[in-house]
Image (tube, helix red, strand yellow):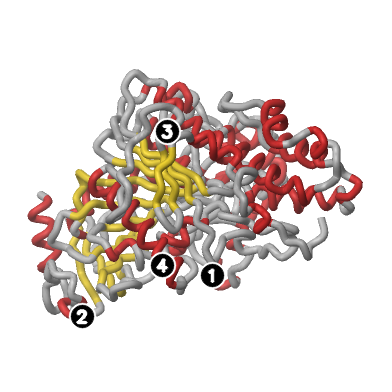
Amino acid sequence: MASITGLLSIIYLVLIPVSCSNDPENIISPDVRVNLSGQGVVIGNTNTTSWTGQTYMQFRGIPYAESPSGELRFKPPVPRKPWSTPLQANDYGRICPQLFEYNRLSPDKLKGDLEDCLTLNIFTKKLNAKQPVMFHMHGGRLQDGFASDYRADYLLEKDIVLVVTQYRLGILGFSGTKSPDMSGNFGLMDTMLALHWVQDHIAAFGGDNSKVTVFGESSGGKLGGALLISPKTPPSSFHRLITQSGSIVDERSTNMEPLAQVTRVCHALKCEDCERIDRAQQCLKRAPVMDILKASESERYGLIIGDHYGTMPVHPVILIEQTNKNVPIMAGFTKHDGSIALGFFYDDFKVSHPNLNTVTVGDFATGLMHRKNDTTALINNNVMTRLLFPANLWHSSDHRRALPAYFDLANILYFKSATVGFTNKLFEKAVYPPIYFYTFDYAGEKTKFGLDMGNAQYPFNGGVHHSDELIYLFAMKPPLNAKDTEVAKKMVDLWVSFAMTGVPQVPDGPLISPMNSKRGPYFHIDKEIKVDDDILKEFTATIDDPNNKNLDRPSKIW
């Protein structure tokens, strides 16, 4: 079937077939047609890579599911029906409903079916080939994010097929009552269907469906872990996994009070009888999209344990013990991953404590710890404070001197402990797959610190901030300077070599070995790739850094 599909793909190219060669001159027409067996024809166009100008084909906004609106809201995704006329796939699909982005859109952009967003973007250089497939899921707290942020200009320097998917978010994707009428975990089910679509159709784009790597950052990494352990994910769906700063054993990965959440949102919508589950479900099902987004603005989302369809039947920690998928894994975090949480906490703390000179380091740190408990049992709060804060610092108000400790505290609580905890749980199994662990340490010219809201108010820099590594994989903040480009090339080498062989490597770099214990080895991604022996050293990476003064902004007042 794959060979037939590949042949049909070539036949449906506009004007001439595309050669296996990477030479851009082999693609004459900007429009490219591909026939998807049992689905229909899609029309894409071409673009060029950033570093060598290779031409690649892009098919954006391909629907893999029916719109989950109307009677399909709060239901498992339904495969998209075949289309009879060629589908224009020359632009990104509609982003899935999310309040932060919707508030920035003009009224004309908020017309039509806002929930018709379950689409894929596919990028490839060769249609008549069998290339490794890299399947990406965006991050964003399971309530923000969209596929158009993830460009192919860097990764398509290599011979791979890149697939970027969208899935339901927030109240529409990760809330529910565990009942048949509103089971929950719909966003997870969306990614499962998208992977099924890839298995059926990726050969038409030159992809090898027996070599699929799932990768995602933050909540996208959590979804990757969920796909690994869910009994509803067929073993053939994917064959390697990369989790970036996202762990399925993090307490924020699960929604422990879904019924109460549905009731709260029902009340916020001003519906009646919200304590009755059937009435609450009907309320949420009938609410206009913008109304339900506004009513659920303050909610937090995670996977629901015990959903009706069995995607997450028991707690993730138990599912890790039960899973038998032997999938090579690469997991890691950024050096200062927690600075995103430190920034948000600082903003909130300043509202109630405008003069931090009257607040001790201990008060500030305790407030940060109360925001997030470490549930991995790797470290408790008393040990953490003894490790990071000497007594004379703890009782002082010298926040500037405490800054490295604040960074490490946030790093541990929000990302590092949970990521190490995920690999530790795998090591506790009698048989575990190869696991490669990294830390991204490179502080380049550009950063995601402050996200889209700015960072000028902080008395500290973001360091190697949460999601900064994405800048070097997806051309998020072009153009890169020469030094940053060299790091980006190393990132592409590492990610693509893992997708191709199951082993991350860079040309002329050190041998990177899988972990042989819970503590290592692991590797650093910086100007050079370096191998290290004990991952627990990363818990004090900021304090131990002789250059940690670079995180301070002396001109800013605490």
What amino acid type should be assigned to the residue bearing mark 1?
Lys
Outermost residue on the front side: it is 546
Of 352 and 102, nearer the camera is 352
Q: Earlier in the sequence, mark 2 or mark 1?
A: 2
Cα gap from disc 4 to disc 1, whole angstroms: 35 Å
Direction from residue 507 to residue 545 in the image, left or right: right
How much space separates mark 4 and mark 3, taking CA atoms?
Answer: 29 Å
Please state which of the two labelled residues, at mark 4 or mark 1, is closer to the viewer. 4
Give left or right: position of 63 versus 556: left
Query: Reading the chain from its start, which is encountered first: label 4 or label 3?
Result: 4
| Residue 294 numbered tag | none
Indicate whether 391 appears above or below 330: above
Say which residue label 1 marks. 109
Residue sitting at x 42%, y 24%:
319
Which residue is rendered at x = 43% and y = 51% of the image? 525
Residue 155 at x, y = what percent? 33, 61
Residue receiving disc 3: 520
In the image, what residue type sits under mark 3?
Gly
Q: Relative to residue 290, is residue 237 depicted above or below?
A: above
